[in-house]
Image (cartoon, rainbow, N blue to C red):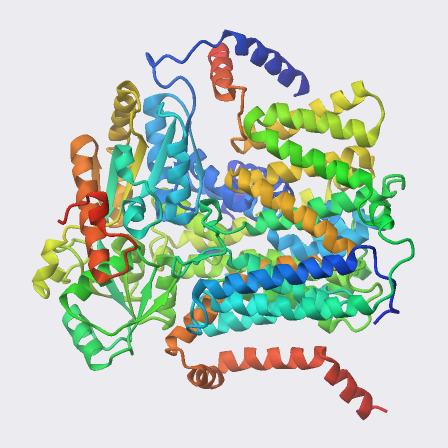
Amino acid sequence: MEALNYFATSWTSLDLLALTALGTFLGVYIGAIPGLSVTMAVSILISFTFSWDVNNALCLMVGIFMGGVYGGSRTAILLNIPGAPSAIATALDGYPMALKGEAGEAIGLSTVMSVIGGFVGIIVLALAAPVVSEFALKFQPRDYLMLGILGIMLVGSLSGNNLTKGVFAGAFGMLIGTVGLDPLTAEERFTFGVVELWNGINPIAVMIGLFGVSEALTQLHYMNKAAIKQKIDRIIPRWADVKKYLPLSLQTSSIGVIVGALPGTGGDIAALLAYDHAKRVTKNPEVPFGQGAKEGLIAPEAANNAAVGGAYIPMLTLGIPGDAVTAVFLGALFIHGLNPGPLLLTENPQMFWFTVGNLALANIFVLIFGLTGIKLFSKIVECPKGILIPLILLLSVVGAYAINNSIADIWWMLGFGVIGYFMKQYDYQVGPVILGVILSRLMDENWRRSIISERESLPDFFINLLSSPLSLVLFISILLIFISQTPIWARAKAMVFK
Amino acid sequence: MTAIHAKKPGETLFGFLVLTFSLFLFWQSYEISGFTALSSPGAFPLAASGIMVFASCINLLKDIRRPAEVGGFEVFWSKVLPPIVSIMIAIIFTFGIILDTLGFIISALLFLIISIQFLHQKGLVRSVLLSLLSLIVIYIVFRLVFSVILPEGIIPEREIMAWIGSLLN
Amino acid sequence: MGVVMNKRLICALAALSIIAAPAFAEFPKKDIQGVIQWGAGGSTDTVMRSVTPHAEKELGVDIVMTNRTGGVGAIATKFVYAKKADGYTLLMGAENPQMYKTLGLANLDYGDFTPINILARGIPIFVANNDAPFNNMKEFTEYAKANPGMVKVGSTGPGGLTSIVLAMLDSQVKLDLTNIPYNGDGPALTALQSGALDVMPAVLGAAIEHVKAGRMKVIGLVDVKTNDLLPGVSPITEDFPGFSSFLPWGPFFGVFVKNDTPKAAVDKLVAAYHTAAQNPDFIDLMNKRGFSIMNVAGPEAEKFLNTYRSVSSWIVHDAGFSKKSPEEFGIPRP
């Protein structure tokens, strides 16, 4: 009963309700604008809400978190610029839908699936937080390495019809990810003595360049083509559609919760793994993946919103952030005089159900704000290219600058924009590059940690890998996926079923 | 998978550049820490750039075998890099260069007016009005709402705001 | 909105012609920019964002804080150094710049800045996995000697707190430990709980909540006296008296301006931050997290900064992982 009372705190107070709504609304736009990140917005709010009551501050921030993760899909679908790394996978099939005039449907479907994913995350948080957090803590460096490898195998699906070009792009991305002072030993890698390169090349700058700028430049080829007329009669998805895709969105939501709960990974990796999963389990998509498959839109959207609830799991139970945003939340709790840590729920038992209730409320606002204003948004794509392209370019510049207030990021963004343009011209997909950038650190660091733990002995590494149940499961899944994707398997299958 | 299609002009050259670039990066990766240890900072970059070299070799071989598109290299300037694209690239790079010295407001305004005028071609007044409107929205969202301090350049924005603030009080 | 902004623009243009040369009679005349060396959610970020609102009240203007991460804080340090010395750009940082010269990361350190306030200092401790077969520093060193290479210790890169504390230990007793690098004490403390690490030197504030919850144990306190938050843990100097030549030592958080900033501006900022750091909310916050409040400026702050630089630079140099000798920069031995 007490739990229910705390759960309802933010639903029954007009102030808290309004702040959650405001936060969610702002969040949708913060998420949609590349360069403005939820992490940044929440940390600005920390000093802004300094003198507020803690519940008020939290409601605003939770709203921004929930809305922001969802909002990333908006620009991904409409302009092929993911608002945040967790929306990269959304752009892969969402943008092709917009090109076919189905932007409204795509946004509607992604909204509903995001909300479903969000609720899966919240339910797991409410019912199984202690179990999941203990499970997440079991992940050793080698298990994170396995997750990274699982993710990088997505290169196979993102390469279009040219696998070797895709492999090149993926490896290029991994290399970009290693630029800068090595986070583990402070050794300089590819810095050529330039201090600005110490911190590496920001993945978001790469992302804005490769997706936004290169797409804008490519669109210049089609200036005299009329803008695509968007069908906006159907925005709320058909019930039959929701029912049809529900199993898939539940599966990918579970991926999202687990990956979100792991302290070393967040919504971006969750969405990519979910996309990969969708591509493997969908036998006969109505539309091929990469050309506007609804499955390819649903999977990452459900997963990245489910990762929100997931990220809260270790944060509330152990005081360990599940991702970058929850790390800032911990700081906020600290400033408001709560002691975030494993004892948080013992000292402030109301916090848990309050957060669960507030997340659920924010998720409902995502549904409301997500489904309103779609018509207006779809119009963006109908805006004449001569105006739209300069605006995309300006927004890309401002977005790249906003990441870290640095002019250097603008140059990286523009540089990758031009590289991406030529890559597209010559049949190289840009998706694998950004995949490599995102996974690079995870793989590099955890490979080295695991091999150092074994004192540089490869045999010991494999012995431990095969003797830990968790690592073994991950290892076998990698093998299975690898075999099923390579020509050997296709040939063997052909022989058997001849 | 699909039928072999003719390569675009410059594709082989691009493949060659990619290979050279990969070899350069492979050498740079080796320079980080050589082949000293499996856990060295250079191990992962070596692996990644090794894959790049390998994949770009195969790509180059494949490209060489494919037939070239008719029309020769002239087609490059119409199909791969038409003037409209190279001009836009030039405009946006110029924007990047003047951004730091002139400041965001002036350079972004110039960028918008010139590029909208160039691409949209519906009259200068319209371009200027559209640019002003978009810039104001972007300025409000980034500078005022999210306090992203955009390069100030020659306009002393903070002084102006303090002055406006004092007027309002 | 458009109309309002157009008015604003007109005002702005008018203002352009009116604004005279800045006078320091009444600093501050406009918003101040605060540049934080570390990322959002980190301890430097948290400390700065919790003290600065109190200082804003004193100054009557906004202090807009931005995170400029990278190069262990060197990017932010260089950025602030490149700005005018007018007091309108503050550097909000941690201890790292004091090691830049010795580690060859930059030619700047806090000697090139005027301290506005050294807010607080952290206390290093040794924590261990609950299952580790030792409970204090003595047992730990004996176990590590008996099992060379078997103890996995978390580290946060050269020049970080863990590397310096381990170098201090190394100067007292030679141990063969396996150092596993993490980028930050947060991830390393998580790894300690998962069993990927056995021991980790960390700042008390980062570990205290996990210790209180019984998720890890404290095996050593790197200080000269006992700590109220850690009853029953004796200071490390009891087992290793040689440590006393380094202590008290610990990472710190401070606000700085570039040298040669007009005295009027410095005085105003010092006064504002001094009052801000006395705010009971802030003090309570820092105590709970196990940071010792310092709240010093002027010669006292400079003395602390110099001592920190001497101890850390020389310990790192003697342990053999400095790029340049502290002597080159005239850093005296402690």
Residue under the image location 27 percent in, 18 percent down: C264
C119 and B25: which is toward the camera: B25
A397 and C152: which is toward the camera: A397
Position of B143 with respect to C208 (left or right) is right
Q: Residue furthest right?
A: B70
Q: Quadrant of residue B16?
A: bottom right
Residue under the image location 60 percent in, 40 percent down: A399
Q: Quadrant of residue C239?
A: bottom left
Position of A82 with respect to B150 (left or right) is right
Q: Please determine whether, in this image, residue A450 is positioned above or below residue C69.
A: below
Mark yes or no: residue A73 visible: no
Q: Please determine whether, in this image, residue A342 is positioned above or below residue C29.
A: below
- Tell me residue C192's x, y (percent): 34, 68
Count of residue discs: 0
Q: Quadrant of residue B134?
A: top right
Q: Please determine whether, in this image, residue A387 is positioned above or below residue A329.
A: above
Mark yes or no: residue A404 visible: yes
Q: Please determine whether, in this image, residue A78 is positioned above or below residue B26.
A: above
- Tell me residue A38's x, y (percent): 54, 45
Position of C119 with respect to A373 (left or right) is left
- Tell me residue A148's x, y (percent): 55, 68
Q: Residue furthest top?
A: C18
Position of B14 with respect to A401 (left or right) is right
- State the quadrant of the N terminus of chain C: top right
B139 and A163: which is toward the camera: A163
C281 and B159: which is toward the camera: B159
Residue under the image location 87 percent in, 54 percent down: B72
